[in-house]
Image: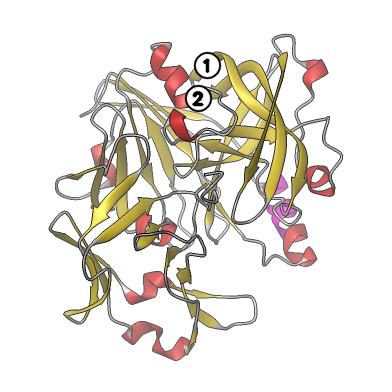
Amino acid sequence: MKWLVLLGLVAFSECIVKIPLRRVKTMRNTVSGKNILNNILKEHVYRLSQISFRGSNLTTHPLRNIKDLIYVGNITIGTPPQEFQVVFDTGSSDFWVPSDFCTSRACSTHVRFRHLQSSTFRLTNKTFRITYGSGRMKGVVAHDTVRIGDLVSTDQPFGLSVEEYGFEGRAYYDGVLGLNYPNISFSGAIPIFDNLKNQGAISEPVFAFYLSKDEQEGSVVMFGGVDHRYYEGELNWVPLIEAGDWIIHMDRISMKRKIIACSGSCEAIVDTGTSAIEGPRKLYYISCSAVNTLPSIIFTINGINYPVPGRAYVLKDSRGRCYSMFQENKVSSSTETWILGDVFLRVYFSVFDRGNDRIGLARAV
């Protein structure tokens, strides 16, 4: 989730599959908040609906949007299928969920994969470790059938955590499904997107994100093509700095016609697994009464301006305090690096084109 993975560990197609992402509360949850969340999930049964659009087969999961900053969706593993909520993360390449092997306290708060109940399960002796900005895990590589909506990846390698630290308060998702390039995988396993592509499950090597705003429903990740109803105008294509990571050049960041950062150009990581916009700046508190008067911050990428309105980058915490969603990127780098997380991606529909090593951006509807 470049969430962050620390350095050193460091158009319509014939078939578009859209997976719902759930927007849920962060680590600030209290015990009471968790109980409320659990009650909401029980009251709103997760149902699969299918619709037809212009001759394409769209598989759409309805969203539950629980007001905060992480977007999750349902997948299943095994035969018969066992369901998990995962973060669809362009900042990492590894796919993992908790296992019955795990005895860490964090695992007890999540759904764990019961390998003995799957007839298609296959274990390996390969182990791996990942350190994120919010926690760390140790896992073992296994193989099984994985389903994302109507997409099926057979004999898919994935990680089963045997140790987890720092994820105790994240009861709202079980694991991470990485959507970055295979070369940055810590487990060495082929990512599920690559497997789906290689198995011919998707007709185009493309996936895209629409992240809903405020408390609205409708967030999706779509595979194999682009549903143009989710954005306005034309997609602006930005080439990657190099194939192998979702990193692009950014020209500058400005406010009120003054450059405030990235003055000589910089790098920008487009990361669906990060809530905020992160860079060499510290989080600061502001007056909630000033939210409606805050100016837009403009990110200029490949010569095109992408303004993010003031209200979009301010969040109110559980104590009623408002603060900027510009946060400090604690990973040191020889170049100025920014992470364009969900704050940016709620404003702009994003397309990740593996076939052409580029990212498309357009104003989200």
The picture places residue 287, in percent across and down from the top left corner, at 47, 90
Type of amino acid under label 2:
Ile
Task: Measure how far apart labels 1 and 2 are at the Cα level.
Answer: 7 Å
In terms of image quadrants, where is residue 33?
Answer: bottom right
How many marks are shown on the rendered structure? Answer: 2
Which residues, given as a range, are shown in magenta? 36-43
Type of amino acid under label 1:
Ser
Q: Is residue 350 left or right of residue 80?
A: left
Q: Report the residue at 49% width, 21% height from top.
A: 150
293 w.r.t. 229: above or below: below
Residue named by callout 1: 153
Q: Is residue 272 something one can see in this rendering? A: yes
The tag earlier along the polypeptide, 1 or 2, is: 1
The picture places residue 10, in percent across and down from the top left corner, at 52, 44
In the image shown, does 182 or 24 lie closer to the viewer? 182
Whether 42 is among the magenta residues is: yes
Q: Which mark is residue 77?
A: none
In terms of image quadrants, where is residue 102?
Answer: top right
Residue named by callout 2: 192
In the image shown, does 24 or 334 lie closer to the viewer? 334
The picture places residue 239, in percent across and down from the top left corner, at 21, 42
Helix, strand or loop for disc 1: strand
From the viewer's perspective, is the residue at label 1 or at label 2 nearer?
A: 2
Badge 1 local density, few (<14 within 10 Å), some, or many (20+)? many
Q: Is residue 201 something one can see in this rendering? A: no
User: Do the numbered discs 1 and 2 sit on residues whose CB atoms are within 8 Å?
Assistant: yes
Q: Report the residue at 47% width, 65% height from top.
A: 329
345 w.r.t. 276: above or below: above
In terms of image quadrants, where is residue 103?
Answer: top right
